[in-house]
Image (cartoon, rainbow, N blue to C red):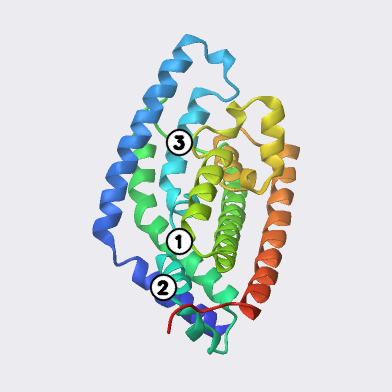
Amino acid sequence: MKKYISLFRIRFLMGIQYRAAALAGIATQFMWGFMLIMIYHAFYQTDAAAFPMTMQATVSYIWMQQAFLAMFMPWLTENEIIETIRNGDIAYELCRPISVYKMWFGKEMANRLSRAILRCMPILLVGYILPVPYGIAVPAGGGTFLFFLLTLMLGFLVMVSLSTLIYVMQLFLLSPQGLQAICVSVIDFCSGGIIPIPFFPDNMKRVLEILPFGSLQNVPLRVYSGDLAGREMFRAMVVQLIWLLVLTALGEILCRIALRKVRVQGG
C-alpha cells in the first residue's frame, strides 16, 4: 500500500504546481456559472412552479458544480496514462512489482483532487458572499452537510473508477480518440453536467439515477441543495456504493485480461 500512496503523493504534488492553469480555469468557471444562473433565472421568472427544483437550489447546484468541476468533469484525463498506452511504455509498467490498475487509479485520484483543491475555495467564497438568489445557500443543517461530504466522496470515487475503466478499455483498441469522444459526451450529459437530472422527463430521470452516471455529481450536489433528502438520499448512497464496487471490480478484471494479451507496436 505504501508504494501506491507514494505514487498518489507524487502525482498530487505535481498537480498543485499548475497555479496559472488553475487561475485560468477559475475565471472560466466564474463566467460559465454566471451565464448559467442568468439563463435559469430568466426561465424561472416565467413560471417558477413549473420547475422540479427551486431557483435557490438550482443556483446552489450550479456553484457547487463549478467548485468541484475537476472532480467530475469527464474530459479531464490523465494524459500520462494515455500516452503510456499509445507509445508502448506500458511494457515498462509491466516490469514493476505493482498493480497497473491500482497505479492508474491512484494517479487519476491525485490528478482530479489536486485540481479541485486549487479551484474550489475561490469559487465557494464568492458563491457564499453573493446575495440571494445568486449565491450558494447554507445547508439546512450539520447532518445535511455531512451527508453531502459523504456522497461527494462516493461520487468522486465512482468517477475515478469509471475513468480508470475507460483507460483499461483503451488497451483493447488501436486508437483511444473515438472511445474518449463517446464517453465524454455520454457521461457529461447523463450525469447532470449540462442539465440537472431532475429537469429530465420522469422516465428518463429514473433510468439515469440507476445508471452509474447518476451516482456522480448528481447525488452530492442535490443533497447539498436540499433537493435530495430522506429515503431517496439513502437509496442514492446505496446505488453509489454498489457502482463503486462494480466498476472497480470490472476495471481490475479487464485490466488483468488485457495485460495478458497486450501487444506493443514498434521496436
On-image quarter of the N terminus: bottom right
* Residue 134 in which image quadrant: top left
Task: Where is residue 227? Give x, y as percent.
Answer: 61, 32
Q: Could you tell me which secondary element the residue under label 2 belongs to?
A: helix
Which tag, 2 or 3, sits closer to the chain's start?
2
Task: Where is residue 252? Give x, y as percent.
Answer: 66, 71
* Residue 247 in which image quadrant: bottom right
**Count of numbered badges drawn on the protein:** 3
At horizontal 48% and vertical 77% (from top left) the residue drawn is: 265
At horizontal 59% and vertical 52% (from top left) the residue drawn is: 155
Name the residue tied to disc 1.
113
Report if the CB atoms under discs 2 and 1 are less than 8 Å apart.
no
Residue 207 left/right relative to 13: right
Name the residue tied to disc 3.
62
Tag nearer the camera, 2 or 1: 2
Name the residue tied to disc 2.
11
Q: Between residues 134 and 15, which one lies in front from this camera angle?
A: 15
Inter-mark Cα distance, 2 to 3: 29 Å
